[in-house]
Image: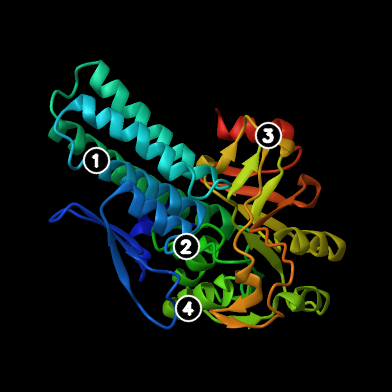
């Protein structure tokens, strides 16, 4: 098993979807809504532009949203002339950014962290000019990015223990480097680590309606990395598991509660239930920043999106105009269906009520 530092030298991601442009103080995002047909990078320079990019899924995936939100807070003070004005702008930016996608806990974690750090630096007199605060926040956002990268590589190392030569992994949506901003990923981290080490592994990716993150993004990303991948319809999930085409299921998460309830892209619950029925291991991979130890299931609002996302495919109608639509973006998987949760701090096994807090430590 390689060490983290050894793995950093072996594995070099081919896709980096988030970067900060120091020359003109802008956040550069790979527009994932245009993939795989166009490779377009957009520059955002205000919290409102960042929030719009998140809301319209130019950037998506919980960790990537968190990194983007951290940089989004920086854009709030680029034109501030005083620390007082900067702090006011940061409070406003947090509200704007938090409202863009309510389910992913990484978003509010990142904005809260950047705001708390700013308050501490100002109140303790460690920064006296806006330029100094700006430099500190840029360094912190970069640290969040670097920590996420290391966390994903570490998850890949832990997850590698769950992969054997020749395995096929079923995933859901896109929990690769596009979803995390680093080029590695959460659910796909063990697959990428295995591939980098010469272990034969392949992936089955459901299309993931209605935004088709599986067919547009997961397939695109894995093909870029040279990893064998097979695309299926969402409705074929049960059959491929029943036919023995899958050795394990590995998915990401947008929020994990202290009792082990997992919020992830719609369709995850279905995979978990079928996997348990057929005796297939179901693993959730997420960094500790994805854990929500305060709220319960009844407290979480699952985001619902535009009905036209279901009525159409990339703008082309596929249903009668005006039909009523239910379009939840996420579902919730009860802990009894989860074999283990893999984090950068180790693998968490049931009972989750006891073991989550032991590992997450907050």
Find numbered disc 3 in the image and state the secondary structure of the residue it sits on.
helix
**Above or below, 361 relative to 96:** above
Q: Tell me the residue at 18%/52% (across/down).
A: 25
Q: Tell me the residue at 69%/64% (across/down).
A: 249
Which residue is the extreme one toward the top?
Answer: 124
Distance, label 4 to label 2, CA atoms, is 17 Å
Find numbered disc 4 in the image and state the secondary structure of the residue it sits on.
helix
Distance, label 1 to label 3, CA atoms, is 33 Å
Q: Which mark is residue 139?
A: 1
Residue 161 occupies quadrant: bottom right
From the image, tell me which residue sits under label 4. Answer: 220
Closer to the eye: label 1 or 3: 1
Distance, label 1 to label 4, CA atoms, is 31 Å
* Labels 3 and 4: the sequence-earlier one: 4
Q: Is residue 167 left or right of residue 105?
A: right
**Above or below, 90 relative to 332:** above
Distance, label 2 to label 1, CA atoms, is 26 Å
Residue 293 occupies quadrant: top right
Closer to the eye: label 3 or 4: 4
Q: Is any atom of residue 166 visible in this view?
A: no
**Above or below, 13 relative to 95:** below
* Labels 1 and 4: the sequence-earlier one: 1
Q: Which mark is residue 355?
A: 3
Q: Which mark is residue 353?
A: none
Closer to the eye: label 2 or 1: 2
Closer to the eye: label 3 or 2: 2
* Labels 2 and 1: the sequence-earlier one: 2
- In this rendered view, identify the residue nearer to me: 269 or 303: 303
Q: Is residue 301 left or right of residue 213?
A: right
Q: Which mark is residue 57?
A: 2
* Labels 1 and 3: the sequence-earlier one: 1
């Amino acid at each position: 098993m390689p060490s983290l530092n050894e793995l950093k030298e072996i594995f070099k991601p081919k896709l980096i979807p988030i970067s900060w442009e120091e020359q003109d103080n802008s956040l550069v995002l790979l527009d994932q809504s245009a993939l795989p047909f166009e490779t377009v990078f957009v520059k955002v320079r205000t919290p409102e532009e960042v929030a719009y990019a998140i809301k319209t899924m130019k950037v998506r995936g919980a960790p990537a949203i968190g990194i983007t939100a951290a940089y989004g807070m920086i854009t709030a003070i680029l034109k501030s002339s005083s620390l007082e004005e900067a702090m006011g702008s940061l409070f406003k930016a947090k509200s704007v950014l938090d409202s863009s996608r309510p389910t992913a806990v990484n978003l509010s974690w990142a904005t809260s962290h950047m705001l708390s750090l700013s308050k501490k630096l100002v109140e303790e007199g460690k920064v006296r000019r806006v330029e100094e605060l700006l430099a500190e926040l840029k360094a912190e956002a970069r640290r969040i990015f670097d920590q996420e990268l290391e966390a994903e590589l570490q998850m890949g190392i832990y997850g590698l223990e769950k992969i054997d030569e020749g395995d096929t992994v079923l995933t859901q949506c896109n929990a690769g480097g596009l979803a995390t901003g680093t080029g590695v990923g959460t659910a796909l981290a063990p697959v990428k680590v295995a591939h980098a080490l010469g272990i034969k592994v392949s992936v089955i990716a459901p299309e993931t309606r209605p935004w088709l993150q599986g067919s547009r993004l997961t397939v695109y990303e894995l093909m870029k990395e040279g990893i064998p991948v097979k695309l299926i319809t969402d409705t074929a999930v049960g059959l491929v598991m029943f036919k023995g085409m899958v050795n394990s299921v590995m998915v990401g998460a947008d929020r994990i509660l202290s009792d082990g309830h997992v919020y992830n892209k719609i369709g995850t619950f279905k995979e978990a239930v079928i996997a348990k029925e057929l005796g297939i291991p179901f693993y959730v991979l997420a960094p500790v920043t994805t854990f929500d130890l305060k709220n319960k299931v009844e407290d979480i609002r699952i985001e619902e999106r535009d009905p036209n996302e279901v009525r159409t495919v990339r703008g082309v109608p596929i249903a009668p105009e005006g039909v009523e639509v239910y379009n939840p973006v996420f579902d919730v998987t009860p802990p009894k269906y989860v074999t283990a949760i893999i984090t950068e701090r180790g693998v968490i096994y049931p009972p989750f009520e006891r073991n989550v807090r032991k590992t997450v430590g907050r």
